[in-house]
Image: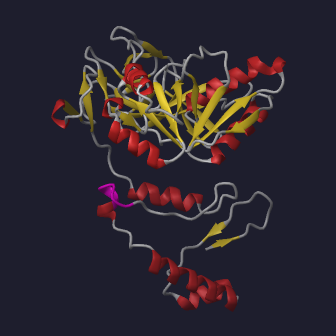
């Protein structure tokens, strides 16, 4: 239970009371209507939700649910305390040696936390944390070894000899930042992103190339063209879009033969992602934008490549389907309904349709 602070900006007093301690609850709430509402809500949650089972949580079969608000600082400390109680020691991750593509788990090796070499994977990127400096960060979870300031690391999508200098790392909590000299398995650090790091990438030391399984993105279901109405803002518009795309806020598509000068198409799971992009462009990059919705509702990447697309197109199989390319020039087909996508997948297996695709290696 929370009691409103008596002074502006003060910290709310938190008291934990068991639900079966009815006398204390009634005393503290001091409102029969609110008390009955609390019991009613608790009973509803008991009926709708399964009991918390920590064994299932640790096996990634169940997720705990917390109620609160970061904006009003309601329930945040309780969540952090419980998160620490529920947390486990770091665990290893399967990785592919020499970054060879393989769907066979037998070709992967477990990298335990006590592994001597440093390894970590990037699970998030963010641009413009400080609008005054236009900085970009990549968030890395350390899997094994030790991060040390100034160390040089390899990158899973770069050429084998390419090294990146991790000159500095930061620990972030809310608006607070602190410099990190060392980090250990289980720690999360923010490193400067030169523009080459993407979600799902692996950083490592040692002589052999290594990559943890990538992080798939959700298949988009909403599409629109986006443009800047003011030609004088084009440079800022492009910079903002490039950095937001690096974050994975939305995905970018273009017409097949567009080398970058044509209209930019955005793809997202929901409309809210488009609204976030427009708001951030205006607030952080000081540019307005116009969006023009498209009627397509499904995207499929073509694993068979452009040759398979051309053959299917010549055979008249792609009527009513929009052919575009992603940021890396790979073919993508846009559909208006699930039925058309399923029918094409059945008829043209050589297309190898996929709902998503990971960023390619730089040496591909």
Answer yes or no: is residue 122 visible. no
Q: How is the image coloured?
A: secondary structure
Answer yes or no: is residue 160 visible. yes
- Residue 65 lies, with reference to residue 120, above or below; the image says below
Residue 251, horizontal then vertical, whole percent? 56, 33
Q: Quadrant of the N terminus?
A: bottom right
Residue 273, horizontal then vertical, whole percent? 63, 43
Looking at the picture, tell me which residue is in the foreground, 214 or 53: 214
Residue 198, horizontal then vertical, whole percent? 48, 27
Left of 292 or right of it: where is 142? left
Q: Quadrant of the C terminus?
A: top left
Residue in the picture at 45% in, 30% down: 316
The quadrant in which residue 208 appears is: top left
Residue in the picture at 45% in, 80% down: 47
Left of 229 or right of it: where is 124? left
Q: Is residue 313 magenta?
A: no
What range of the chain is rendered magenta? 57-62
């Amino acid at each position: 239970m929370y009691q409103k602070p008596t002074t502006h900006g003060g910290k709310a007093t938190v008291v934990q009371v068991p639900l079966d301690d009815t006398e204390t609850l009634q005393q503290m709430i001091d409102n029969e209507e609110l008390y009955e509402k609390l019991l009613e809500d608790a009973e509803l949650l008991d009926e709708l939700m399964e009991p918390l089972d920590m064994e299932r949580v640790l096996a990634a079969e169940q997720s705990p649910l917390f109620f609160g608000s970061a904006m009003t600082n309601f329930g945040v400390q309780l969540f952090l305390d419980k998160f620490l109680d529920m947390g486990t020691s770091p665990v290893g991750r399967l990785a592919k040696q020499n970054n060879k593509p393989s769907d066979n788990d037998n070709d992967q090796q477990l990298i335990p936390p006590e592994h001597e070499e440093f390894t970590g994977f990037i699970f998030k990127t963010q641009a413009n944390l400080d609008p005054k400096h236009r900085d970009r960060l990549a968030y890395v979870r350390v899997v094994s070894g030790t991060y040390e300031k100034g160390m040089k690391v390899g990158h899973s999508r770069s050429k084998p000899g390419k090294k990146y200098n991790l000159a500095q790392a930061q620990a972030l909590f809310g608006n607070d930042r602190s410099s990190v000299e060392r980090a250990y398995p289980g720690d999360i650090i923010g490193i400067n992103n030169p523009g080459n790091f993407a979600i799902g990438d692996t950083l490592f030391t040692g002589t052999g190339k290594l990559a943890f399984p990538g992080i798939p993105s959700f298949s988009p279901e909403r599409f629109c063209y986006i443009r800047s109405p003011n030609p004088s803002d084009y440079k800022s518009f492009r910079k903002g879009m490039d950095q937001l795309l690096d974050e994975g806020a939305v995905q970018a598509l273009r017409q097949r033969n567009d080398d970058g000068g044509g209209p930019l198409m955005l793809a997202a799971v929901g409309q809210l992602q488009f609204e976030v992009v427009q708001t951030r462009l205006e607030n952080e990059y000081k540019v307005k934008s116009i969006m023009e919705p498209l009627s397509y509702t499904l995207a499929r990447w073509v694993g068979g490549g452009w040759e398979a697309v051309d053959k299917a197109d010549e055979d008249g199989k792609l009527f009513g389907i929009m052919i575009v390319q992603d940021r890396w020039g790979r073919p993508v087909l846009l559909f208006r309904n699930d039925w058309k996508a399923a029918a094409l997948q059945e008829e043209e297996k050589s297309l190898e349709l996929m709902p998503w695709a990971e960023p390619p290696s730089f040496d591909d």
